[in-house]
Image (tube, rainbow, N blue to C red):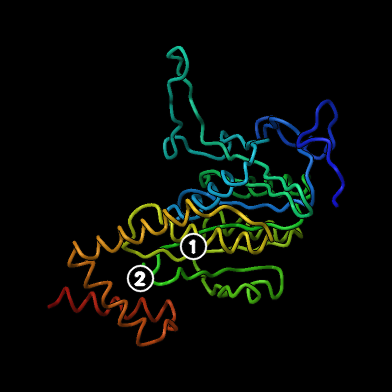
Amino acid sequence: MGRRRTGLFSGGTRPLAGAFDHFPQSAVRFLRRPKLRRPVLVAAFEGWNDAGEAASFAASHLARAWGAVQFAEIDPEEFFDFTEVRPEVAIGEGDSRRVAWPATSLSIATVRDEGRDVVLLRGHEPQLRWRSYCETVVALARGLGVERALTLGAFLSEVTHSRPVPLSGTSSEPGLLEKFAIEPSRYEGPTGIVGVLSGALADAGVPTTSLWASVPCYSIPLSAKAALALVEVTTAMLGRSVDKVALEEQAFEYESRMDDLVREDENVAAYVARLQELEEATGGDLSAEGLAEEIERYLRGRRSG
């Protein structure tokens, strides 16, 4: 049996006193001070790193299913251009108006038996001062005693919606990707906050794994199927269970709607047929670069035909 904890959050005491005191008042706002057991950080961002909203949807599902409770937020003032990611206004009780700013939320999902607590970091990809932003997250991770980190992302790829979602990743933990049959990523090129933060955490000595789901280029919004794939491998790596029934139903509905799209749009149908031919011819082993070249040749042929 694990050591009994007196509560999720501290009251008058501050178990992490001094750990975060160097932050500017504007950078991190604590709603309460958490007590954690061997925490692991799971981070996902809306925006460039989030094709089909798969990564952010996966993280939100975990937060809901695990009953995560928010304990802090990173204030957006230093990190966002509000003309790009605008605050939202809502009407509350008594017709009062409230402005919600695009802050990064940190919440806790605890466990009752032996295991790790999970710190979920969610928000929109910041536009400004990425190095300072990542330094803030790294300092938070250290202050919270985070032992491992998982970052989630999704990208558009030349894959079909009917096949299992291809997953790839990078990890500073030797052998971890192979253990879970995750294809090592060979991507080089522009990156988003997920790539930068993953590198910053690993450089700071936090064992970090970055998981990416491939979403079809012709996908409708919100790929629940890709989100489900990320949830399944994340929970497997964490050794924690989660209720996936609702997400599985949404993934089935997503695939049905994609089938409808292919039936109703002849251009999409032709594109998907060509992808399927290539997948069958190569057994799914054609490299991303080779597949992209084949598709480009096919599209050029259609334009010139």
In this picture, is 59 found above or below 213?
above
Q: Is residue 18 visible?
A: no
Left or right of 224, for residue 61: right
Residue under the point 58% across and 74% down? 184
Task: Classify mark 2: helix, strand or loop.
Answer: loop
Q: Residues within 10 Å of mark 1 (few under 14, many from 20)?
A: few
Spatial CA distance of label 2 from label 1 is 24 Å
Q: Which mark is residue 160?
A: 2
Left or right of 30, for residue 219: left
User: Which residue carries the number 1 mark?
Assistant: 190
Camera-side residue: 252 or 17?
Answer: 252
Q: Is residue 133 visible?
A: yes
User: Where does the image place residue 60, in percent across and percent down from the top left?
Assistant: 53, 46
User: Given the image, on which type of amino acid does mark 1 rest?
Assistant: Pro
Left or right of 153, for residue 197: right
Considering every residue shown, the one lying at the far bottom of the view is: 281
Question: Tags 2 and 1 in contact by the CB under 8 Å rule?
Answer: no
